Image (cartoon, rainbow, N blue to C red):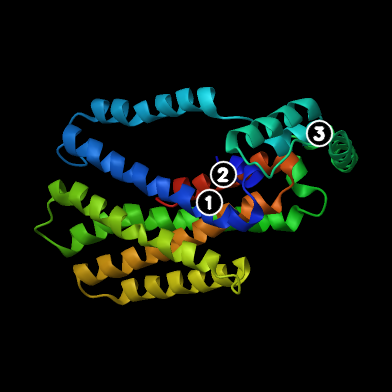
Amino acid sequence: GFTMVAENVPIDFRGKIVMIANSCFFMGELLGCLTAYFTVDSLTSGDWQSLTLWSNSTLLLALILNFLFLDESVRYQLVMGKAEEGFKLLDKIISFNEKKNVRPLTEEEKQGLIKWQATLSQEFTNQDVASVGALFRHGYKIITLIIWLGWFINSFIYYGLVLVLPEILEEMNSDYDDSSDLASITISVLIESISIVLAFIFISAQRIGRKQSLMLFYFLTAGSGVMAFFATTGNMVVVWATVAKIFINVCSFYFYLYTVEVYPTKYRATGMGVASAVGKLGVIIMPW
């Protein structure tokens, strides 16, 4: 999804659109909480089969909508040498938007795009397509390793806070009742959505670059984690842990954006997919 955004949205709007797409993540979490409200009693009891079934029904909806309405990326079509398909899609876009001041491509412009595609084909061989090895060629080795480390750290910290926090609260409160977990998770998701607003503001600020913003929010995440470590009450632990989750979410959004912007079209999807997989490795290792 984020790869499609990167290839179809103009650079000036890309960051904002990626943030809006990320907001759908929280909408999905809230939908999960709402589904859980009707299907389970707590995190440890209830009809988990129905919860799984209704949650996954959204995948079927996405599959149908993608099949009916989603077009291939024009940029991808051109890079893969499917120029005619790309030109037809461009004409469809122009027609759909009904822009009177936008005309169809001339033959000269089409030939220019074909030459551009041929140049790219010389720079990137076919073995670069959908190849993990391609992420380490053409000067991308260091960048790829840094991106993988960032995704790993973001997932490790975020899901560490999500999974460990209930256990900490249980240890601090002898009257702990897990039936309130669903309500707590719902409230937490609502509060975390603040990270979308923060990221949107900083990405919209042209004077602040990706790198500087990322450094700032990593610093704020670390500071919040230290404050949570020294907190003496359950409420303060929750407050600082939630603040840390907000800041680490912003870091994750920046890595989404950076990953789709840094790789060439031919293996952008591979770069995003492998980075996401490395991030999930952090989720797996964190409990141990």
Give the class, few, some or many, for how many residues have Cα within 10 Å of label 3's Cα (few <14, many ≥20). few
- Do the CB atoms of the residues marked 2 and 3 lie less than 8 Å apart? no
Tell me which amino acid carries mark 2: Phe
242, above or below 276, in the image? below
Question: What percent of the width, then of the height, locates residue 180?
Answer: 15, 50
First of labels 2, 3 by sequence position: 2
> Which of the 4 quarters of the picture holds residue 204?
bottom right
Q: Is residue 103 left or right of residue 200?
A: right
Tell me which amino acid carries mark 1: Val
- Do the CB atoms of the residues marked 2 and 1 lie less than 8 Å apart? yes
Q: Is residue 33 left or right of residue 222?
A: left
> Which of the 4 quarters of the picture holds residue 12?
bottom right
Q: Which mark is residue 127?
A: 3
Which residue is label 2 attached to? 2
Q: CA distance from mark 1 to mark 3?
A: 29 Å
Question: 279 or 60: nearer the eye?
Answer: 60
212, above or below 270, in the image? below
Which residue is label 1 attached to? 18
Secondary structure at numbered mark 3: helix
Q: CA distance from mark 2 to mark 1?
A: 7 Å
Tell me which amino acid carries mark 3: Gln
- Do the CB atoms of the residues marked 1 and 3 lie less than 8 Å apart? no
Question: What percent of the width, then of the height, locates residue 161?
Answer: 36, 58
Instruction: Answer whether residue 70 is visible to the viewer in this image.
Output: yes
Q: CA distance from mark 2 to mark 3?
A: 23 Å
Tell me what residue is drawn at x 31 percent, y 53 percent: 189
Tell me what residue is drawn at x 72 percent, y 27 percent: 88
Question: 68 or 213: nearer the eye?
Answer: 68
Q: Is residue 195 left or right of residue 4?
A: left
Question: 69 or 109: nearer the eye?
Answer: 109
Tell me what residue is drawn at x 45 percent, y 73 percent: 220
